[in-house]
Image (cartoon, grey):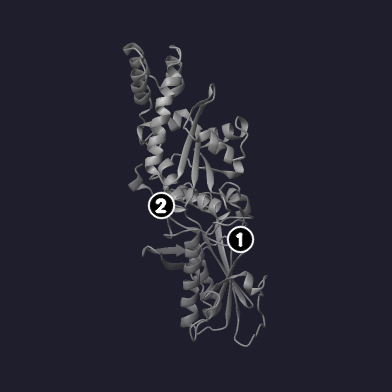
Amino acid sequence: MSQEELRCGYTTGTCGAAAAFAAAALLFEEEELTRVLVTTPKGVELTIPIAESVLENGWARCGVIKDSGDDPDVTNGALVQVTITWERDGGEEEGLHKPLQEPEKWYRYPDSGQEPSEGDALLFLRGGQGIGQVTREGLECPPGMWAINPVPRQMIFQQVQRVCRRCHITGRVYLTIEIPGGEELAQKTMNPHLGILGGLSVLGTSGIVEPMSEAALLETIRLEICQRRAEGSTNLLVVPGNYGEQFVSGYLGLGLDQGIKCSNFIGNTIDYALEAEVEGLLFIGHAGKLLKLAAGVMNTHSSVADGRMECLAAYGAACGAPTEMVCRILSCVTVEEAFGILEEAEGLLEAVMEVAMDRIHSHLKRRAKNQMMIEAILFTNDRGIVGTTPGAVAMMGKMN
């Protein structure tokens, strides 16, 4: 199935906005909606089914089943609920399903320091069951607050304000968004690593889930870099994946709590680090992946580009390898196999890797626009470290 044929879904933020609108209509108009029309930040109109409606004395709750389309999202099928209560002007609270926290612990619309327009309600939003809380700097939400990102907050507030205006509702309106089972689902996400504890995040910048998109992974990398900088880190350790993590912790004895996993997105990671004004990056990864950097390949996924054998063969020839050896290297499938061939001639592997690391260093510095220290260490499982750029060992010392 091609990318074009994959079905899009909608974000938890869109679910929350639809549920909030339906809950407001149920409480203020006693109208039980089965569907809600939501216009996403990209201007796309979505009709969202309402799966749950409950009206009690002084409060209402509606729920939407998350549909992630063909994207393998752990939240697909989860129920996103919004409960709404109302405190009238003058503090009348008869029958009110009271908030569980003081208003200053909630997100507010309009923002703190601003008063609502004449005839508008003052809106408050919090997380509840299954919604995580932020514990670290550098994310979209401040530490101590619920992990409800700015765009979903705005969508939810705008939907509720629409109903409040047409019903002439003033006073304070309280909204609680919940995802039952979210705490368990969050263990399958990056939330614990990012310092979002106790549940899921309410996410979405476009309102739409694009199937198989790289956007979510790239955003996670960007957020981790921003987070490290907000915590005061100036030199960052970067690993492509699990092999790098294991080598860093087991062989080098470096702590993974300061590392960032970049997957195949070497170039994007460097770009994000430049934006965050990082002073230095140290990439540590398996030679089977990072050797592609010698060819200037900044997305190391096998579907994008390779060039490993071509580089090893060319550098081997430049260092004196005979034609027969060069041809054998070009026919190799793995870097380990090629290294074994280079080791047949004494000192040849070391000479080739010296050239390769020089090329890797050159390409990394060019991508970083020579605006930061940027180094790399390559290893294999059998040989350990097989190559380092000139300042890599010194930078590694700064990571301890």
Residue ranking furthest to the bottom? 90
Residue 76: in sight, yes or no? no
The three-letter amino acid code for the residue at tag 1 is: Pro
Residue 32: % across, % down: 51, 72
Q: Is residue 179 above or below residue 36?
A: above
Q: Quadrant of the C terminus?
A: top right
Query: How many circles with numbers are drawn on the protein?
Result: 2
Q: Quadrant of the N terminus?
A: top left
Res. 381 visible in picture:
yes
Quadrant hosting residue 103: bottom right
Q: Can you give x and y, in whole percent of width and height, for residue 237 in the image?
A: 53, 41
Give left or right: position of 117 versus 98.
left
Circle 1 Cα neighbour tier, 10 Å, few/some/many (<14 / 14–19 / ≥20)? some
Residue 356 occupies quadrant: top left
Residue that badge 1 annotates: 143
Residue at the image position 61 percent from the left and 37 percent from the top: 254
Which of 391 and 211 lies nearest the eye of the viewer? 391
Q: Earlier in the sequence, mark 1 or mark 2?
A: 1
**Residue topped by disc 2:** 210
Q: Amino acid at mark 2?
A: Glu
Q: Nearer the viewer, residue 290 or 200?
A: 290
Residue 27 location in percent, x, y? Answer: 56, 77
User: Could you say which is closer to the camera, residue 66 or residue 384?
Assistant: 384
**Could you tell me which residue is drawn at 33 percent across and 11 percent down?**
324
